[in-house]
Amino acid sequence: MKVEAMVCHAPGEPLRLELLDLDGPRDDEVLIEIMACGLCHTDLSQIEGKAAPYPFPVVVGHEGAGVVREVGKGVSSLAVGDHVVPLGIGECGECGNCRSGKTNLCEAWLAEIAAPQPRFSLNGQPVSSYTGVGALARFVVMRERSVAKIRQDVPFHLACTISCAVATGVGAATRTAHVHAGASVAVFGLGGIGLNVVQGARLAGASQIIGVDINPARAEQARPFGLTHFVDPADGDPVAQIQVLTGGGADYTFECVGHSALMQQAFEASRIGCGCCTVLGVPPDGEVMRIVPFNLQLGRTVKGSFMGNMKGRSELPGLLDHYVEGRLNLDELVTHRLPIARVNEGFALMKSGAALRAVVSFADA
């Protein structure tokens, strides 16, 4: 079938509307019409060629929400008309990793990303799908294990955020770091991911949630999500400021930008003896986080978190229950809604810091 999609042909080039060929769903797959797609900084890193694991040309976008329009034979958990989010990390539910209760990195998904099979093509040439999704297309085809069914009473422009920003941030606080009640937390970078770390820390009962950002407007923007203190690096060393606020260092720190120097700062801002630093940001290709081994021997730990350690099919839909019941703030997270034709503007708004989360829509939803 022919599908409209926004395609990046080379690093640094703006996205262009193209008419691509898309293979229909096979036995264990579904066809999804994308209704809305959030714009993520990792998409921008792929577009700019800074952290670009997928070959060009590529359809970026992995924070989508839509409606199942066709199901392949053998699909049992999804039906035409279901509201869904396509998943950058699938969940087979059967492999050792899925059964372990320790990780969301499904072994079947790991095998898929090691040998991706593009479903889009242009003039007979393959076009990559970022994270295997490519949600800046009107339609995508996904394996059943890479689709989560969601409730239908949440608008698509809000529902799409759970598949990356919300899951990554909330999950990092609650599933990766296991923030405890009464803890002190410091979040480096208050973009879409960082604000959801703030929300996750609030849900976990943290008593002190400190945000670090070079954009002073974030101080007030982050308050509705649970921020209690704000640190502006222009006022001095953020590590020293956090140590003063917390009496020696935060119990939990999170790096949400993808900058190796900030990762080191986040580590150093964690409390000696028991502090935990979680790295969420995706740095440019080749960057290295440097840690003095003695600082680890002082009892600090460093963790990585991919999509908040949340399982896509079985756990992500519950985030929308939190929203409907008033525990998660999605309304103030999505600050800009744009038609797909203005997607390049949306990425510019993100890069400038004007947008918390920009969402592009393919239909009235």
Image: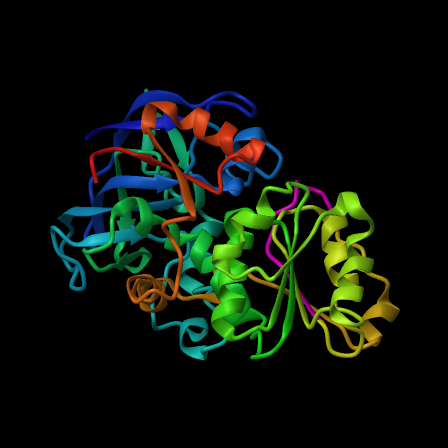
- Number of residue marks: 0
Q: Quadrant of residue 20?
A: top left
Q: Say which of 74 and 356 sits in front.
A: 356
Q: Position of residue 183 (x, y in %)?
A: 63, 75
Residue 122 visible? The answer is no
Q: Position of residue 37 (x, y in %)?
A: 35, 40
Span shown in magenta: 276-288
- Is the residue 165 above or below the residue 323 in the image? above
Principal SS element in the magenta part?
A: loop
Quadrant in which the N terminus appears: top left
- Is the residue 348 above or below the residue 185 in the image? above
Q: Position of residue 70 (x, y in %)?
A: 14, 46
Is residue 286 highlighted in magenta? Answer: yes
Q: Quadrant of residue 77?
A: bottom left
Is residue 183 highlighted in magenta? Answer: no
At 59% across and 31% down in the image, what residue appears? 49
